[in-house]
Amino acid sequence: MNTRADNHEKLFSFLKGSTILIISNIFLKAINFFLLPLYTNNLTPSMLGVSDSITTMTGFILPLLTLGLDSAYSAFYFEKNNPDRGKNVYSTLSFVFFMLGIVPLLFLFTCPSISALLFHTKKYSLEVMLSFLTVAVNLWFLPYSLEIRLKNRILAFGMVNMIASVSMLMLNILFVSVLKIGELSLILSAMIIGIEQLILFSSIVKSKPKRRDFKLDLLKDMLRFSVPMVPSVIMMWVLSLSDRYVILYFCGEAAVGIYGIGLRFTHLLNVIVNGISTAYTTYAFSSHEDQSAKEQYYYIFNITSIVLLLISFTTGLYGKEIISLMTEKAYLSSYRILRDMMFAQSFYAMSTIISYGIFFEKKSVYSLIAVSFASITNLLLNLALIPKYGIDAAAATTLIGYLIHLTISYYYSERLYPCNYGIKRIGVISFLMYIISLLFLEKAFLIKTFVWVFVLGLVFYLYRNLLYKLISFIRQLT
């Protein structure tokens, strides 16, 4: 069993990795965020709606073809009694992902039909084709990126992300505002960036997949773990992305575009969530048997949750002012959905952290139960409410769905791996922040500011002991 010093070392690596990833992304994401007026000035809501509808399809196909093997990669990579386990996992899944990447290429001939199905015209066939190519490239670079993460080469991973982000930024400016290629802009950028990431990730991983390290028995074990997660992938898509198509059917492309603006504000949270979750996977799986692991999980969960909730509260409270400042008038109505979309993303991040208890025990069926119940509820509410209330209903049902997902995930995770996360206090804080941001959304800016300062002070007071411990821990590390 590892000593407390060993666990502190792992925690330090986690904090270091998270910090690197967050810093490597936050500046570039901020630039991209502040270029939002450029995008909304050159892309009409209908153009953005077409682009988002196609990328939503990609958001379904990519994780579906992954077969849950990205999660199996992490779950099976660490084996104390088998020093070769890591390279066996790497080589085995590299060959599998290469074959899976060929699948979307087989559907290129269907692009005109898909365009006609979605938009009642074949004019967007090229955009659909590029989205299929993007899926293939993403599958091909996935094993390299996973290998880098699990080897804890977070700096290299962060550098690739930084390069990709800069490239994406430049390409978006070129295609959106200079060449003005409309709906094609963001989709073409994504495909080019995927190719760039494939080149960079594969060049960083020094050892290449070897046939002798391919283990069929290992693949079977991983598939037994991951295949039951495929329905979870489908259900997660229904929960997080299917509302675009309900909006598209009942409200049109422009409504999808306006809804997409609200979703882009969740990128503020994704900077933090992705940085933490990327580094947390290695830390969680390698330390969950340590004596002090649960105490550290408590700190990580609460600090992450409070940061995300404060961002969500601030964005929701000042939603009207932010949207007015950052977008054209055609997108102004998106301010009404900001609050629900931001809090929904926070709940998703919380469920991701507390769900590790399920994966420690390799009981992915419980994850399926949680996401299925949440997604079915979400879909039924979408079909019932979106025709009458539009994107406002879509945002609210997304929030409800993620809250259900968090609740059920927590219940099963606690049964398998009990850990005191302090979820009740977080729940109360979340509720108060949400209600306050709802009640004061249309109030004057000065009143909102007084309310914001009061809530911030209250949160710092309630979590003062946690902050003291965090500061003390950072001082020990330095």
Image: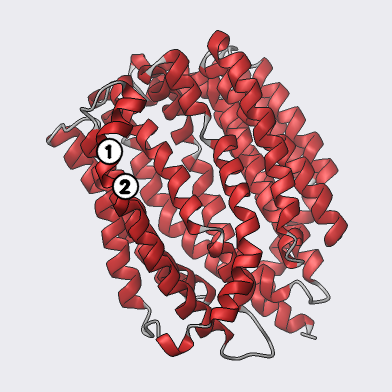
Say which residue appears at 40% left-offset and 72% top-offset: 156
**From the image, which quarter does the N terminus lie in?**
bottom right
In the rendered image, which residue does mark 2 sit on?
107
Q: Looking at the rendering, which quadrant does residue 443 occupy?
A: top right
The 10 Å Cα crowd at callout 2, few under 14, some 14 to 19, many 20 or more, is few
Q: Residue 361, how many percent across, how many down?
A: 77, 66
CA–CA distance in space, label 1 to label 2: 7 Å
Q: Residue 149, how many percent across, how many down?
A: 50, 71
Say which residue appears at 30% left-offset and 60% top-offset: 163
The residue lying toward the viewer, choosing from 292 and 208, is: 208
Q: Is residue 18 rendered to the left or right of residue 114?
A: right
Q: Determine whether label 1 and label 2 are within 8 Å by CB.
A: yes
Say which residue appears at 23% left-offset and 27% top-offset: 122
Q: Report whether residue 355 is seen.
A: no
Q: Is residue 104 above or below residue 36?
A: below
The residue lying toward the viewer, choosing from 242 and 435, is: 242
In the rendered image, which residue does mark 1 sit on?
111
Say which residue appears at 12% left-offset and 36% top-offset: 179
* Amino acid type of the residue that numbered disc 2 sits on in the rendered structure: Phe
So how many labels did they put on this image? Answer: 2
